[in-house]
Amino acid sequence: MFDYVIVGGGSAGCVLASRLSEDPSIKVCLLEAGPADTNPFIHMPMGILWMMHSKVLNWNFRTASEPQLNNRKLFWPRGRTLGGCSSSNAMLYTRGHASDYDAWANLGNAGWSYKDVLPYFKRAENHEAGPSKYHGVGGPLNVAQQRNPNVLTSTFIQAGIQCGIPHNDDFNGAEQEGVGLYEVTQKNGRRWSTAAGYLRMASGRPNLTVITEAHARRVLFEGSTAIGIEFQRKDQIEEVFAAREVILSAGAIQSPQLLMLSGVGNAPELKAKDIALVKHLPGVGKNLQDHLDVLVVNKCTQSVSAGFTLKNFLRGAWEIFRYYTAGKGLLTMVGAEGGGFAKTSPQERVPDVQFHFNPLRLSNHGLDLAFLLGDGYSLHVCDLRPKSRGEITLASNDPMDKAHINANYLSAPQDMERMVKAVKLARKILAAPAFNPYRGEEMRPSLQCQSDEEIRQFIRERAETIYHPVGTCKMGNDFMAVVDDELRVHGLKNLRVVDASIMPLLVAGNTNAPTVMIAEKASEMIKQARRTPQRAHVAAPTGQGSRELQHEVKELETV
């Protein structure tokens, strides 16, 4: 028996485990399906290429066939170890646009405006460049400048400026728009995951129990009250109980999956899978959003890139020495050194496209090793504000089966048109004079691809995820909301969801820093709830037809 049981030792779960266990009178249990983060490739930034191939430290999800992407089944890597995706991502520290959080608040989520969440971003952060209006110091999450970015990355920044995009040395400051170097979650040239920053300092506390290789199977209920978790270690099924709360931090794929396996979701869908209904919440698994991305790739005429080249191979021993002795060199390189946020047209009020620049030839998440051979550079082109929505559903009622992912990319026609504009802007940047000394043949999409329809076909053939799924347990008070603005599951007691799945709208940027912020804010909510009597919170549908919807809910709960 513990006070709190947290499912998922990832970007949010490690934060919660650390913050809640600060009180020595509170007993906390953290369950993680993957192993401990002991593999050295986790902590080596360049090890991200290896993490993409791992069958142990990566969930290796695949979407269903995507109709608008030539029916391809897209690869969705997710971290499967302590630290979760913060142990396997590109380490880029971006928060999104301030207006993203104001939009959350405008949907009726009190306390989630930009001015409300900024203190939690700062609380989490140890900004090596020092404190400011927008940055904090002394927090567990170390945020650093890159140590030795490639010359091609500085060339990209110059090219963006030549195309009229302003330089920006802080994407998390007063303005998001511009091109520059990304700040990274590193310390001394090593990856600084939430496991490293939060969990490590809490690991010696006697009131914190961390159980790895523990696959959660379902939430245990007494009536409408969550009381624990059933989980599986190897072939053994075990149970752990929570006197105060069960907290799901398993991410945008597995938190809704676990709710549905536990009888919380759309009643007809659960009945079809022979799952007994605990609570009809039709929004569980719905509202899936992700950033779609496509790569524009050029050969490089000089041997300066970070790809698989003879020059870099011969430097291997020296780079290993530099990494382990000084935390510098090629092995400290992040997934994308430079990038930026831009507008595809003057009519856009805020940036609607994001760039990630790689000083190497990249294809298919780095899984295509042959493509990495030779000098080159790549520019990720990402639609920041997609209108398309997908869903997570159950493949079966077996907790060990992977969920069914229907991302539904480009189902909203305006998403494709924005991607076409973004590809054109990316090519304009790579054609700028700054790249003249380095520019070789365009490998993708190739010079034969010129018309809008040819660019659309290129996107259908090559677009992939940029690893930002959110929204499947969305926060709100409408009929499709899953949690309220304190992240408590509607209509149930002692159950919260704390991870990227609660985002009602996808932020315009990378999602790791916002997920850490969500967990920091949630930890304060949970502590406050412990100090005050718990009030009832039942989802009451609002808006047109609410009376009919309430009647429908009552009928479905009798199924």
Image (cartoon, rainbow, N blue to C red):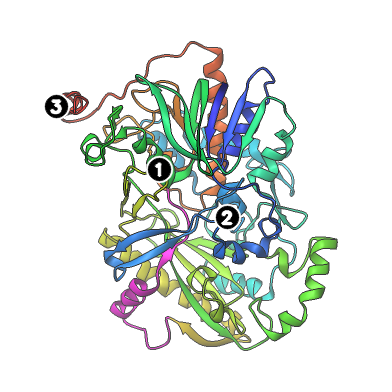
Residue under pointer 1: 399
396 or 267: which is nearer to us?
A: 396
Q: Is residue 437 visible?
A: yes
Distance of mark 1 from mark 2, alpha carbons?
A: 19 Å
128 or 463: which is nearer to us?
A: 463
User: For residue 538, which quarter of the picture?
Assistant: top left
Distance of mark 1 from mark 3, alpha carbons?
A: 34 Å
Which label sits on residue 57?
2
Distance of mark 2 from mark 3, alpha carbons?
A: 46 Å
Q: Is residue 132 visible?
A: no
**Secondary element at tag 3:** helix
Are the residues tagged 2 and 3 within 8 Å (C-beta)?
A: no
For residue 468, above or below residue 136? below
Instruction: List x then y, in percent, for residue 396.
Output: 31, 46
* Amino acid type indicated by mark 2: Leu
Instruction: List x then y, in percent, for residue 149.
Output: 70, 68
Disc with the residue nearer the chain's start (1 vs 2) = 2
> Residue at 55% of width from left, 31% of height from top?
521
Residue under pointer 3: 548
